[in-house]
């Protein structure tokens, strides 16, 4: 661990990167132009300021880096490191990258492939010595490969990790993989035929972490520091589990959905490849721009053009090798979001256009804020995604609202539908503590603007609701009426 931290040499320094007058103007418009992805048609004052949205979502700090023409155009931080001390956040404030760590780790794994130290398509177990993926009926005739692990198509269990409070005993990686104390997560096991379905697995990236450590003959965090972070000039980034004093002073504290600080400031994640990176938006922007350059054949600092193309080619699901990938004709977007206890983060990049952004927050409600910020950035810089959709509202109906109000069961959690005359609200801890207004499209169909979701109620013969379908993207989640 100490060796890894010594690689950093100097401690991070606090500084704000200069921006041109034009970039300052664009930055100001972004900060004043936040919007939800769905808005009520013809509603006034649709643009919102970042400060008011931070207060609304109870997110103490947000840090942003915007990429334009293949380089960081500007970076700014807003708010405070923690609600108690009120220390101001800066562009060198450290945040947990959470699952964005997977994208950075994937680059490290693919470097080892290009060096001939790992094989993308050979059996993972033949590249492991200290531990083996236990075989079972699912693996008969089909072995797990590194490509499957990086694509989340290996059929492995354990979606994500909760981390450990500062001061708690931290398990070894082998204890994590087998679910042995003090590990709190289930053992990582094959639960579907490898290569046949996409299922997100942080557990799979823990297997990748072990493969990388053994192939490089270095501790994972030391390998990543020397082979990925340092070559990219990511001087404010580390996969180390324990931050030294100089770094802890620059680290933001995580905050829960109610705005209270996480005990001890943050959780520790020994599952480093899946969730263990501490970094800044400006540092992560270096990852985005390097992938852009590699894909364009302008750099082979970390990956060849062919390997970058492989990384950004969809396998199963909407995922390449370490990034979510969307083919948009003239360009391809690559992205990853992440959430640990009290932190939310998002990276977004486009090939060919040299555009992108990184947004990091120290609040559990940060995902909704990030989405609003990305809508503003997209509008200012002409992105092909994050377009704002206007929806017309039907005439409010107090009787219809009353008919669907009540308590529902949604994903094993209670959800409240609250009627207040001509207004209807939805509230569930799944989406934070605040209630969100439901706007009517008909007597049974409603949409939200606080989140890009809609609700379709199913009525009984007496006109009251039996349940609903919560629609989010391509997915529908049933809610059952309780009372």
Image (cartoon, rainbow, N blue to C red):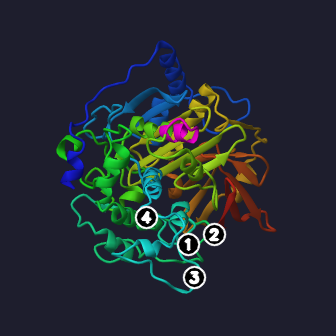
Q: CA distance from mark 3 to mark 4?
A: 20 Å
Density class for disc 1 (Cα within 10 Å; few <14, some 14-19, many ≥20) is many
Q: Earlier in the sequence, mark 3 or mark 2?
A: 3
Number of the label disc, if any, that sits on residue 197? 2
Q: Which residue is mark 1?
A: 155
Counting residues from the start of the chain, the first of labels 3 and 4 encountered is 3
Tag shown at residue 138: 3
Mark 4: secondary structure: helix
Helix, strand or loop under label 2: loop
State the image quarter where residue 58 is shown.
Answer: top left
- Whether residue 333 is visible: yes
Alpha carbon distance from label 4 to label 1: 14 Å
Point out the residue furthest to the top here.
21
Mark earlier in primary sequence (1, 2): 1
| Predominant SS of the magenta segment | helix
Q: Are marks 3 and 1 in contact (CB under 8 Å)?
A: yes
Instruction: Place residue 203 in its image quadrant.
Output: bottom left
Span shown in magenta: 290-299
441 lies left or right of 216: right
Residue picked out by circle 4: 208
Mark found first going from the N terminus, 4 or 1: 1
- Residue at image point 78% right, 63% down: 463
Work out whether mark 4 precedes mark 2 in sequence or the reverse, and give the earlier one.
2
Q: What is the crowding at mark 4: few (fewer than 14 residues within 10 Å), some, or many (at least 20)? A: many
The image position of residue 414, as x and y in percent, is 54, 64
* Residue 150: x %, y % from top left: 51, 61
Question: Residue 141 in magenta?
Answer: no
Q: Nearer the viewer, residue 479 or 15?
A: 15
* Above or below: residue 71 compared with residue 462: above
Q: CA distance from mark 3 to mark 2?
A: 12 Å
SS at mark 1 in the image? loop
* Extreme residue toward the right, this view: 461
């Amino acid at each position: 661990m100490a060796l890894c931290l010594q690689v950093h040499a100097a401690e991070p320094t606090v500084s704000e990167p200069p921006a041109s007058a034009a970039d300052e103007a664009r930055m100001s418009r972004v900060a004043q132009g936040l919007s939800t992805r769905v808005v009520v048609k013809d509603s006034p004052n649709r643009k919102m300021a970042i400060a008011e949205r931070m207060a609304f979502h109870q997110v103490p700090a947000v840090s942003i880096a915007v990429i334009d023409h293949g380089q960081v155009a500007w970076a700014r931080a807003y708010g405070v490191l923690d609600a108690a001390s009120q220390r101001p956040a800066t562009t060198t404030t450290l945040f947990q990258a959470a699952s964005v760590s997977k994208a950075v780790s994937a680059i490290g794994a693919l470097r080892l492939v290009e060096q001939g130290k790992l094989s993308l398509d050979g059996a993972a177990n033949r590249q492991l010595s200290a531990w083996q993926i236990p075989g079972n009926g699912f693996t008969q005739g089909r072995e797990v490969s590194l490509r499957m692990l990086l694509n989340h198509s290996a059929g492995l269990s354990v979606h994500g990790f909760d981390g450990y409070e500062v001061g708690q005993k931290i398990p070894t990686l082998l204890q994590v993989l087998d679910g042995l104390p003090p590990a709190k997560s289930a053992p990582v096991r094959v639960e579907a035929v490898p290569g046949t379905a996409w299922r997100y697995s942080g557990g799979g990236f823990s297997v990748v972490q072990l493969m990388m450590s053994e192939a490089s003959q270095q501790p994972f965090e030391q390998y990543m520091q020397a082979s990925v972070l340092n070559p990219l000039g990511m001087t404010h980034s580390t996969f180390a589990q324990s931050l030294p004093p100089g770094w802890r002073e620059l680290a933001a504290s995580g905050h829960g959905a109610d705005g209270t600080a996480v005990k001890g400031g943050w959780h520790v994640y020994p599952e480093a490849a899946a969730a263990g990176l501490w970094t800044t938006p400006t540092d992560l922007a270096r990852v985005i721009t390097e992938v852009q350059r590699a894909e364009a054949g302008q750099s082979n600092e970390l990956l060849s053009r062919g390997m970058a193309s492989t990384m950004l080619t969809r396998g199963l699901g909407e995922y390449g090798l370490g990034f979510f990938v969307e083919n948009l004709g003239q360009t391809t977007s690559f992205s990853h979001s992440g959430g640990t206890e009290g932190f939310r983060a998002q990276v977004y990049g486009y090939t060919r256009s040299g555009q992108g952004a990184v947004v990091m927050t120290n609040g559990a409600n940060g995902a909704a804020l990030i989405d609003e910020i990305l809508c503003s950035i997209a509008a200012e810089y002409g992105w092909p995604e994050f377009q704002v959709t206007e929806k017309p509202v039907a005439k409010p109906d107090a009787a219809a609202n009353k008919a669907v109000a009540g308590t529902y069961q949604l994903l094993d959690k209670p959800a409240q539908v609250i009627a207040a005359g001509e207004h209807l609200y939805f509230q569930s801890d799944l989406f934070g503590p605040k209630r969100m207004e439901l706007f009517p499209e008909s007597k049974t169909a409603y949409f939200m603007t606080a989140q890009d979701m809609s609700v379709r109620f199913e009525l009984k013969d007496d006109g009251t609701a039996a349940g609903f379908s919560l629609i989010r993207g391509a997915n529908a989640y049933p809610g059952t009426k309780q009372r």
